[in-house]
Amino acid sequence: MLPSRTTRRRLLAILAAAGVFAAILGLSATRVGAEGETCPKCGAARKAGAAFCVACGQKFATAAPAAAAAPRPSVVQVVAAHDNELTSTYGSLVWGSNLRVDSLVGSAFAVGRGEFVTDSGLMVGARDVKLRTPSGRTVPAQVIGTDPMIGITLLKAEVDEVTPLELRRDAPAKIGEGMTALGYPSGSQARGEPVVSQGVVSGLHRGGARIHPVEDYLQSDASLPRGLAGGPMLDGGGRVIGMSTAFVMGGRVFLGLQSGIGFAVPADWIDRGLAWIRAGSPPRGWVGALAVPADSERRERYGLPPEVRLVVEHVFPGSPAAAAGVKRGDGLVELGGESISTLPRAQEQLLAARPGDTVSLSVVRTGGPVRLDVPLAPRPDRPRLSAIDALRFFAELEVVARGEDLVVGPVRSGSTPAYYKVASGDVLKSVLSKKDWEHGATDNSRWRSVKTVADLEERLATAYSDFDFTVGLRFKSKDGAKREMYVWEILTPTASL
């Protein structure tokens, strides 16, 4: 395995734990407290539907709503067949082949007559989609549309034996609320009732899982077998509060970072995705800036005050952000006149905007606050970074052309280059990546020399695949010592604003 930063180590842990999810099935019925009562341990007020005390964690002893209240005939099994290999640069370099995908099995739930929602990750590269009903019938399905930002797909199929579910629109999910996840495990065919996994909502506004560009997930402690990806999470009244979502890579589906931690796309985001798909998937607005959470290190680096929560790490050349004067290191404070402190809140506003709309952007930089008017452009499907920018964003590596060499700039303590003992002044000599990621020419994967920025652009263009950005870098230090550094990043369709 390639050594990596914290986020990548978590993803590698997902791969290592893949077999655990299929073996874990079902939790005992959750027991919840009644509104108006108090916790017997700390005396805090109980919230309606809560399975444990939010103050001290004490479990409550009153029975939860029966799982039978969940309308199980509304759930079907999804089988997505593939006839093409999906590329992974990492897979090709390490395992010597592309990812061969036969079929992916997940779940879906009815939201209208003949309409079903599922996880978009199951659909990547699929040539044929079928639904298996609770009666055992197999029915062809048509993809009406996919929202790659939010991570849902809307399917259409002639299935009359299921009842549409209602999305809960009047109130968001609450921490401690009892919930039921439904779906069909991937190791079995749909026939009869789906499996039921009960638990509680254990977290809100979770992100950083690198599953979809918009990450504003519900977190649940329910045990989720692999086939439950795309299945509904229901409240005690049988309404949808979320859709179980998964990290999908080739033929493997991972529903959580570890056992007892699963994620769901909340009902309000499902609603937004469905509205967009049903409107014909019109172009969305794009600013053209990559923004990341502002930790103390970034705030110190860019001279930003402690209240800044988002910072611009890259501005795409030729984008509306570049034309409006947005700069790397700007702290994002307001968008459209509203305060923003998280990426989902910023994305929520932009996903509702159209190309041609002008949005006001308030930023903080060393010189003080600045207000910028940004005319939005159509959002690209896959905006790609230049070679220099890709190394800085994915690898924390600054490289500059100096004479006939590509030289490493300042290296921060604790960064990926520092881990590999790459130092300022080292010269980048060669790059390892696939020669042809589209056609999977793995036999030509080898180290190739680089001397110019143009060489680097050519080499790093092959480091992108359907799933990842993977590259090996070889350096020569001033004392003649040689260093190697490896970068692996999972890609989402676009994480830019």
Image (cartoon, rainbow, N blue to C red):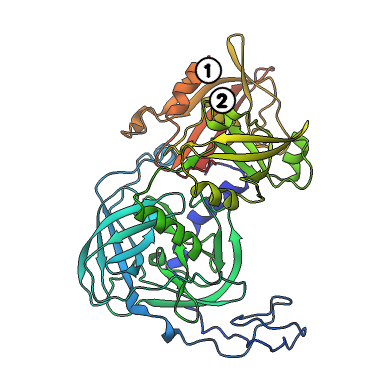
Secondary structure at badge 2 equals: helix
Furthest-top residue in this view: 403
- The numbered mark at residue 453 is 1
242 relative to 58 in the view: left or right: left
Report how many numbered discs are placed on residues in the image. Answer: 2
Horizontal and vertical percent position of residue 26: 46, 78
Vertically, is 426 above or below 132? Answer: above
Q: Is residue 170 visible?
A: yes
Vertically, is 182 above or below 142? Answer: below
- Callout 2: 10 Å neighbours few (<14), some, many (20+)? some
Which callout, 1 or 2, points at the residue further toward the start of the chain? 2
Horizontal and vertical percent position of residue 56: 73, 77
- Callout 1: 10 Å neighbours few (<14), some, many (20+)? some
Mark 1–mark 2 contact, CB under 8 Å? yes
Residue at image mark 2: 388
- Amino acid residing under circle 1: Val
Secondary structure at badge 1 equals: helix
Q: Nearer the viewer, residue 63 or 308?
A: 308
Determine which quarter of the picture holds residue 394.
top right
Q: Residue at x 30, y 60 (%)?
A: 155
199 relative to 407 in the view: left or right: left
Horizontal and vertical percent position of residue 320: 54, 31
Q: Residue at x 33, y 65 (%)?
A: 116
- Amino acid residing under circle 2: Ile
As measured in the structure, the alpha-carbon distance from the residue carrying label 1 to the one carrying label 2 is 8 Å
